[in-house]
Image (tube, coloured by chain):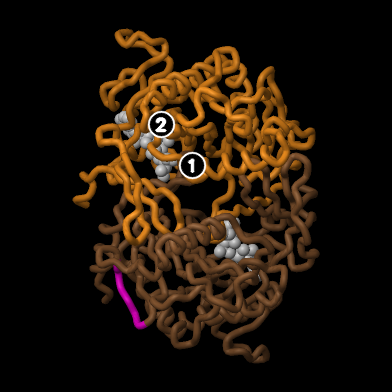
Chain colours: A brown, B orange
Amino acid sequence: MASQNRNPEIRKDAVNNRWVIFSPARSRRPFDFKSKANPNPNNQSECPFCIGHEHDCAPEIFRVPPDPSSASWQIRVIQNLYPALSRDVAPPNSSAPNSTGDVAISGFGYHDVVIESPVHSVHLADLDPVGVGEVVLAYKKRIDQLRCHDSIKYIQVFKNHGASAGASMSHSHSQIMALPVVPPSVSARLDSMKQHFDQTGRCSLCDIRSNDLLIDESAHFISIVPFAATFPFEIWIVPVDHSSHFHDIDGAKATDLGGLLKLMLRKISLQLSNPPFNFMIHTSPLKDTSPAQLPYAHWFLQIVPQLTGTGGFEMGTGCQINPVFPEDAAKVLREVCIP
Amino acid sequence: MASQNRNPEIRKDAVNNRWVIFSPARSRRPFDFKSKANPNPNNQSECPFCIGHEHDCAPEIFRVPPDPSSASWQIRVIQNLYPALSRDVAPPNSSAPNSTGDVAISGFGYHDVVIESPVHSVHLADLDPVGVGEVVLAYKKRIDQLRCHDSIKYIQVFKNHGASAGASMSHSHSQIMALPVVPPSVSARLDSMKQHFDQTGRCSLCDIRSNDLLIDESAHFISIVPFAATFPFEIWIVPVDHSSHFHDIDGAKATDLGGLLKLMLRKISLQLSNPPFNFMIHTSPLKDTSPAQLPYAHWFLQIVPQLTGTGGFEMGTGCQINPVFPEDAAKVLREVCIP
Ligand SMILES: Nc1ncnc2c1ncn2[C@@H]1O[C@H](COP(=O)(O)OP(=O)(O)O[C@H]2O[C@H](CO)[C@@H](O)[C@H](O)[C@H]2O)[C@@H](O)[C@H]1O
Ligand SMILES: Nc1ncnc2c1ncn2[C@@H]1O[C@H](COP(=O)(O)OP(=O)(O)O[C@H]2O[C@H](CO)[C@@H](O)[C@H](O)[C@H]2O)[C@@H](O)[C@H]1O
């Protein structure tokens, strides 16, 4: 379609009040899983994310360790070759609705890929805690660069693992998208946490620890199944100390988080037979808040194994149906024995 | 798990303010697609929805034509054998949060199945407009029964077609769920439409007709691709005359809707190679509003072909990425030639 050469656009209609990103470039991206049924293809020779294939990728932003002249690297942060948002269009300056209440703004933003390992067959959970911590610190470093842009309002870090979790590339990676708007789920979450704070004087995530729902803990983080988990075996990793923004994490905490994240990924892999999964870092919007902490906003990392599909009920209502009670999922995950 | 015998429960946490239905019974339901890759299995001999297998189903609520002693029928509305909500528990009477802000209420509600044809291989789009209209009227009749219950706040009609759209049964059917709470997407939609009305004095769906986005029209309905379609080739069928509640439809309009719905399903089937799809009827909450119309609320039917997956970005932000501009999708669908 001719529109594949059009710039991306972000639209909101007057009925749902929900932003949607229109991005014709996305339809050109490759899909390297042989079939959805085979989540571990061995097509290393063609993989642009493998070491030695750097020239097949969109430009590098930085690498770890940070020597661009060296042939070896541990992590690469690169531009996404098929970005949903474009860094080359003008940032939106207003979003006034037209006469029918519809809003369209330019699809300005950043869309990067974090290659988590130089080796095709190495997954995130195969790295040691320090190695996973280095990936966490790469997210932080890139966010620190992106949040300098005045037009960036929110930054979403996420990972897709396995074709049924949406991944189109099998080489271990995650993604970072910097957005010119605060997305709807984020506003709703912040509003809800603020409401709880206004009513109780407490942050809802500072109080979340519960024996029933606890899976594990480390020096600075706990892992739990949330009280109203939207998916079976959903896990939240929550910093024990109050913190609004993920990017305030330091090196020691990143390694500690790396250890707990690795443990959770190994537990779901063992218990649930290496399921496809997503993880998302839920942080706070930028600007209006910095540099101060928001007393009601507390960042966390959500892990969702993809075990059940969804259907028309969930699309219609925004309400999920979960067959597994959180207490039962937490007990199972607490008791998984890691060899 | 022992909890499979527990009653369903509806929970909301203090972070996301989103209802989730916990329903252990759901994990027992059968899956009759041989594999997700084979969306048209021929396992008629075991299908409980086929004529002659009525005894393998949960109890019948009514049939069309309405003679329960006759061996023949055209449509059956039955209870779901693995209901997400239970009609046998006490309706919730309050939803006060506990000290951590979490809410849990009893999983009261109704969950029914509409079997759209006695014959395994006949799909909804194979019926004639009057036949599709009869299915629409069966939805209305069942809603009219359910909305008498004081505790029912919203009723969601939806259809899953094909395994990737969530269907576990291949025999043509849809579902009706009656809920004791107004779900989050519905409140958000109503708030957004009310805001548009307050600002402009107009209903956002009365004004939605646009030449660019129009696909087809009938005497009482138009079909369009919405301005901010969340999915490629998403279609809305909207009544031309203002109407808040789907259940106010009459026989003539139901047949007219049947014709346009059939046409849209045939168009996506031809143009997009018989894709899996969902449809959802988006109507208004019950009680507080009836009998009067709400000037800002206008019901519609949304059809979503399942062409792309989603990933961590969408789960994290609630914001979809759509590679196809609505104007382009509308042009393609307008021009599909139905033989
Ligand atoms: N040579 C190269 N150089 C640089 N980048 C390259 C590249 N080759 C491919 N890429 C990019 O690498 C990324 C790989 O990402 P994932 O496998 O996590 O899923 P993807 O973003 O395709 O879509 C999933 O995640 C998104 C966001 O959640 C959903 O919209 C979608 O439906 C789901 O399938 C793609 O975004 C692709 O554009
Ligand atoms: N003998 C019998 N008598 C009566 N009823 C019977 C029956 N045998 C099966 N059923 C019911 O028939 C229904 C068939 O429904 P669908 O195929 O549309 O999808 P399902 O509800 O399973 O799940 C999809 O839709 C739901 C709701 O959107 C999602 O939660 C889920 O992930 C997705 O797979 C099931 O709900 C099942 O319980």
- Which residue sits at x=70%, y=62%? A85
Q: Quadrant of residue B253?
A: top right
| Kind of element beneath mark 2 | loop
| Camera sees residue B169 | no
Q: Quadrant of residue A47?
A: bottom right
**Residue tagged by mark 1?**
A317
Q: In percent of the image, x 71 and y 74: which residue is there?
A: A149
Residue nearest the viewer, comparing B159 with B87:
B87
Q: Position of residue A139 (x, y in %)?
A: 56, 77
- Residue A218 lies in the magenta-colored region: yes
Residue reaching furthest left? B2
In the image, which residues are magenta? Answer: A214-219
Say which chain tag 2 marks.
B
Q: How far apart are labels 1 and 2 at the CA level? A: 32 Å
Residue A199 shows in the view: yes
Kind of residue indicated by mark 2 = Asn
Q: Nearer the viewer, residue A232 or A290?
A: A290
Residue identifier under label 2:
B42
Q: Quadrant of the C terminus of chain B?
A: top right
